[in-house]
Amino acid sequence: MDLKVAPRAEVTAPPSIPAVSTHELSRVYGNMTALSGLSLTVNRADLFGFIGSNGAGKTTTLRILATFLTPSSGRADVLGHDVVREADRVRHLIGYMPDFFGVYKDMEVTEYLDFFGACYKIPAVQREKTVADVLELVGLSEKKGSLIGALSRGMQQRLGLARVLIHDPQLLLLDEPASGLDPRARIEMMAILQELQRLGKTIIISSHILSELQTLCNRCAIIEKGRLIYSGPVQGVRNETHAGRIFRVRVAGVMRTAVELLQAQPEIREALEEEGRIKVMLNDDRTDPSLIPEVLVRAGVRLVEFREDEMGLEEVFLKVTRGETQ
């Protein structure tokens, strides 16, 4: 479906200008530094995963981009517009969905969206179609006459997404949009986000569900204690963070002998028995993995299985962060 809602806010930035650009962005609360020198770029039409533990600085960053917080130092631009000096223009270009948002439970779904449409000065003659379009996009057309208080948690989250879409923003800032949802509701939410990206929206999404971000996002950033650890393609996070390649080995005979042989190799960072196989991690990606079967076969160990185990985003995150917060 084509999203036809409010007139798109005028954008003067040429296509070469990224959706989001921050330079040495910092935010200090008293004696606590929530964000420290964050330099980050999000390209247009990215579905960008923002990853970090609680207290890492994700929400602070999103709130600065949404113009709700002023940075202590540094600069942040949205589509070429400074979030401090051009805050009003930025607000018409973004849709911000916090992790917890209030809803008017005694209002009907359409009444609620019509109210926010009026806040964005969408003409009354256009609001009915605008509301119908965003409800169709988020899969709530059948609930348009329902009271918000009667909706499930998942439907209320989708309604919150419909609210931030009402003025057709170009950039969506979504802070834990799948928080508290059951598996089916999470899958439905992720499908909606993929459709929004297909429609040309740029989306920044923070989430603790890293396995979903791995398949959903094309680029991501990892931050800890307010500092950037990695920013780039999801597929490149393992190599760039030097998390190492992992292989699974199964042998016939005494497994302990094979483990000791592998542990003795300087090119191997780790070799340990795990669920009937040997988990082997190389020191870096430049090491030829054929070293593993070669060492075993030369020692007379019979190899039954040898395969690379693709390291997931969760495992990389655990490898490159310490779980520290401010």
Image (cartoon, rainbow, N blue to C red):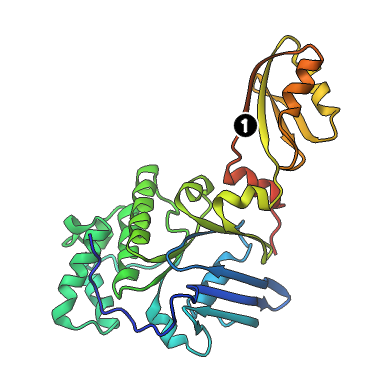
Q: Which residue is mark 1?
A: 308
Vertical side of 298 occupied by 30: above or below: below
Tell me which corner region of the image, top left, top right, bottom left or bottom right, holds residue 103.
bottom left
Q: Nearer the viewer, residue 17 or 225?
A: 17
Q: Report whether 285 appears left or right of 311.
A: right
Vertical side of 209 occupied by 79: above or below: below
Q: Which amino acid type corresponds to the residue marked 1 in the rendered image?
A: Glu
Which residue lies at the image location 18% right of the left edge and 66% below the top edge?
A: 132
Tell me which corner region of the image, top left, top right, bottom left or bottom right, holds residue 74.
bottom right
Vertical side of 289 occupied by 85: above or below: below
Label 1: how many residues lie within 10 Å, few (<14), some (14-19) or many (20+)?
some
Which residue lies at the image location 63% right of the left edge and 77% below the top edge?
A: 23
Question: Could you say whether the residue bearing mark 1 is in a helix, strand or loop?
Answer: strand
Check the picture and name the quadrant holding the C terminus: bottom right
Which residue lies at the image location 30% right of the left edge and 55% below the top edge?
A: 155
Q: Report whether 76 appears left or right of 292.
A: left
Q: Work out whether residue 233 can be spotted.
A: yes
Q: Position of residue 93 (x, y in %)?
A: 39, 78
Q: Position of residue 222 (x, y in %)?
A: 62, 58
